[in-house]
Amino acid sequence: MRKFHYLKFRHLLILAVTALVLLFAGCSSNKEKKKADASSETKLYEMAQNSLSAGNWVGAISSLQLLEEHFPFGTYGEQAQLELIYAYFRSDEYDSAIRTADRFIRLHPQHRHVGYAYYMKGLASFHEDASFLGSLFSTDNTNRDLGAARDSYNHFSQFISRFPESEYARDARQRMVYLRNILARYEIHVANYYFKRKSYLAAANRGRFVVENFQGAPAIPDGLAVMAQAYYLLELNELGDDAATVLAHNYPTHPALDKNGKFDRRYTERAKKRSWLSYATFGMLDKDEPLGFDTREIFDPLYVEEEKKLRPPHIKK
């Protein structure tokens, strides 16, 4: 009996010792694993920084994606997400930049740099269709979608309302002014197109939209001229007179006004006389079509200046 108890005790002792050895070995292994993980995380982050510094955006994106995938809650997790937004932007992957910014805002709404994510959304939308912004009026773009420009304006507006004192707010406001002017001028461009199609009510609505929604834009005088001409062509003379009076009072040098400050009705009168060519082509071709309006050289002398290609600021650590 004593021998049995002794053997049992010895067996238990062996098990206990084995368990302790495994426990310490496991702790040591975990410590080594954590140390290896920390080392790997640091190396990935350093690789990403080197790629960013060298302008290797593809390499930076690859390293930052790996960092976010394997160490989402690590030391550099949140910073990596912000820098991934920047890297996507610099590689012209604007949709990815916007999606990454949206995800950061959703996951970290109280982060001290969340304003940067809002700002980068606006900046990515701003550049999303750079070819459109750069050549808006070189060809007929009446059917072109202005969604990216409107999205950018709205993103910047949201950013400024939330972070008016941000270091990026000044740049956002400047870009909003630029976008406002682009959007307003586009409405005039479309109104001129409607004049050619003799869709005078549609033209009047475009002009009124500019006047009511883009205060301060250089396109305002043309918006008033569009309204005056369209209303006169619709024989809504009282409304035409109202628009012409406001135009003369605020922009007396507008070419649509005669030497007495009255709206020049010669163009509207000749437009009422449709030629056989106009009838044959359903108004598409008409030598007597009413004139369109584009007074940027008078009221917006900087319109030929290209969009400022500002390098987006890199988020500070």
Image (tube, grey):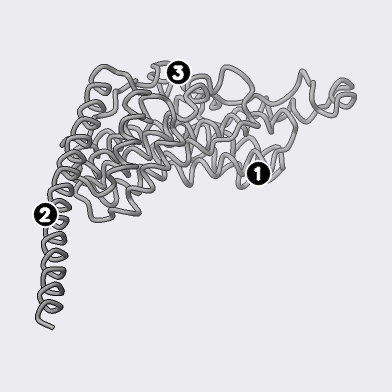
Q: Residue at x 70, y 38 (%)?
A: 200
Q: Is residue 168 left or right of residue 94?
A: left
Residue of label 1: 237
Dot 1: few (<14), some (14–19), or many (≥20) neighbours within 10 Å? some
Q: Is residue 293 left or right of residue 314?
A: right
Front-most of 138 and 185? 138
What label does residue 199 carry, if any? none
Query: Where is mark 3, residue-wise?
Result: 297
In the depicted view, which residue is nearer to us: 116 or 135?
116
| Residue at numbered disc 2 | 24
Nearer the camera: disc 3 or disc 2:
2
Give how far across and how far down residue 89 sits, in percent.
Answer: 37, 29
Sequence-wise, which precedes: disc 1 or disc 3? 1
The amino acid pointed to by label 1 is Asn
Picture coordinates of residue 201 (x, y %)? Answer: 69, 43
Tell whether 201 sits left or right of 306. right
The answer to which of marks 3 and 2 sits earlier in the sequence is 2
